[in-house]
């Protein structure tokens, strides 16, 4: 995996934690409304796995995920990247939203790299 600065590592971890909170809130609201939660649950699981994987790679924290879990998470996260890129392209320069999306995009890309790294297993 490429060398990642400590600042980028910290921002990526915070971004993933923020994404998890956002998905948990969405799941809660959708559950209350009786909406289909399959997609949100799948994304929440993938981001949780992603966070565990980068913490494993960067901070040597253990994880309990299988190779199948990692492959599924990678595919879900890769699927999120285009929508984040689209939102980023529509955001205004210098806006807080653009900064958030920039960090989320970087975090997703780093997670995918980390999952693809053979030493992650």
Image: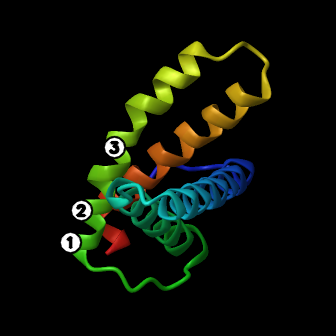
Residue 76 in the image, given as x and y percentages of width and height = 32, 51
- Helix, strand or loop at mark 2: helix
Q: Secondary structure at mark 3?
A: helix
Q: Earlier in the sequence, mark 3 or mark 2?
A: 2
Q: List the single residue furthest toward the front.
A: 33
Question: Which mark is drawn over residue 112?
Answer: none
User: Residue at the spot x=45%, y=43% of the render?
Assistant: 109
> Real-space Cα distance between discs 3 and 2?
11 Å
Q: In the picture provided, is 117 more to the left or to the right than 34?
A: left
Q: Is residue 81 left or right of residue 92?
A: left
Q: Residues within 10 Å of mark 1 (few under 14, many from 20)?
A: few
State the residue position of label 3. Answer: 78
Q: Name the residue tied to disc 1.
A: 68
Contact between marks 2 and 1 (CB within 8 A): the answer is yes
Q: Is residue 29 above or below residue 88?
A: below
Quarter of the picture holding the C terminus: bottom left
Q: Nearer the viewer, residue 9 or 69?
A: 69
Against 95, is 1 above or below? below
| Residue 43 on image: x %, y % | 40, 56
Question: Could you say which is closer to the camera, residue 11 or residue 79?
Answer: 79
Q: The residue tagged with tag 1: helix, strand or loop?
A: helix
| Relative side of 81 to 94, left or right | left
Q: Which mark is residue 71?
A: 2
Instruction: State the CA–CA distance, disc 2 to disc 1.
Output: 5 Å
Residue at left offset 78%, top offset 21%: 95
């Amino acid at each position: 995996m490429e060398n990642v600065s400590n600042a980028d590592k910290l921002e990526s971890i915070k971004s993933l934690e923020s994404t998890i909170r956002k998905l948990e809130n969405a799941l809660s609201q959708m559950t209350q409304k009786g909406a289909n939660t399959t997609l949100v649950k799948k994304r929440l699981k993938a981001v949780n796995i992603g966070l565990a994987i980068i913490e494993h790679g960067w901070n040597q924290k253990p994880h309990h995920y299988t190779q199948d879990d990692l492959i599924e998470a990678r595919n879900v996260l890769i699927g999120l990247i285009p929508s984040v890129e689209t939102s980023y392209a529509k955001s205004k320069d210098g806006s807080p939203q653009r900064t958030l999306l920039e960090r989320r995009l970087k975090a997703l890309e780093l997670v995918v790299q980390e999952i693809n790294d053979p030493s992650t297993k």
